[in-house]
Image: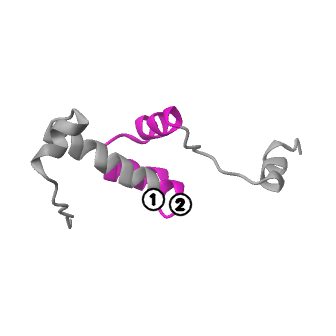
Amino acid sequence: MGSLTIPLSDDLWLALGRSPGELQQELRFLLALKLFELQRLTAGKAAEIAGLGKLAFLDQAAKIGVASIDLDAAQLDDELRDD
């Protein structure tokens, strides 16, 4: 598996009130969340990148306002139609 290294100044941990490990986890989650929101990753793959289970990932996403289902009006009508 590949990795990504992002240089961060030491004072960033203090400014954000996070330990280096906490900030690393938060950044992994936010990266995965944004890629999921842009529909470039499935929820399962995003959860894997974030280091979470799928349901935990979707729960955290919902808590900050990212919908786990993004259907337009026609798709929603199709899903709700009682055939």
Q: Is label 1 in contact with label 2 (beta carbons under 8 Å)? A: yes
Which residue is located at x 48 percent, y 55 percent? 36
What's the amino acid at mark 1? Answer: Leu
> Looking at the picture, how far across and down is residue 60, in whole percent?
44, 35
The correct choice, above or below, for 19 with respect to 41 in the image is above
Specify the farthest residue to the bottom. 2
Rendered image quadrant of residue 66: top right
- Magenta-highlighted residues: 36-64
Task: Report how many numbered discs are placed on residues in the image.
Answer: 2
Secondary structure under tag 1 reads helix
Q: Is residue 40 above or below residue 83?
A: below
Q: Residue at x 39, y 53 (%)?
A: 32
Q: Which mark is residue 62?
A: none
On screen, residue 46 versus residue 68, left or right, reads: left
Name which quarter of the figure residue 11 lies in: top left
* CA neighbours of label 1 inside 10 A, class few (<14), some (14 to 19), many (20+): some
SS of the residue under disc 2: loop
Question: Foreground residue, 79 or 13?
Answer: 13
The image quadrant that residue 57 belongs to is top left
Identify residue for label 1: 35
**Disc 2 residue type (three-letter):** Leu
Residue 20: percent from left, percent from top = 14, 42
Q: Indicate left or right for 75 with 17 as reference.
A: right
x, y percent for residue 26: 30, 42
Residue 58 among magenta residues:
yes
Q: Nearer the viewer, residue 28 or 23?
A: 23
Can you say whether 4 is above or below 67 in the image?
Answer: below
> What's the mark number on residue 38?
2
Split into 4 quadrants, where in the image is the N terminus? bottom left
Side (left or right) of 80 relative to 33: right
**Residue 53 locus on image (x, y percent):** 37, 40
Question: Foreground: 34 or 54?
Answer: 34
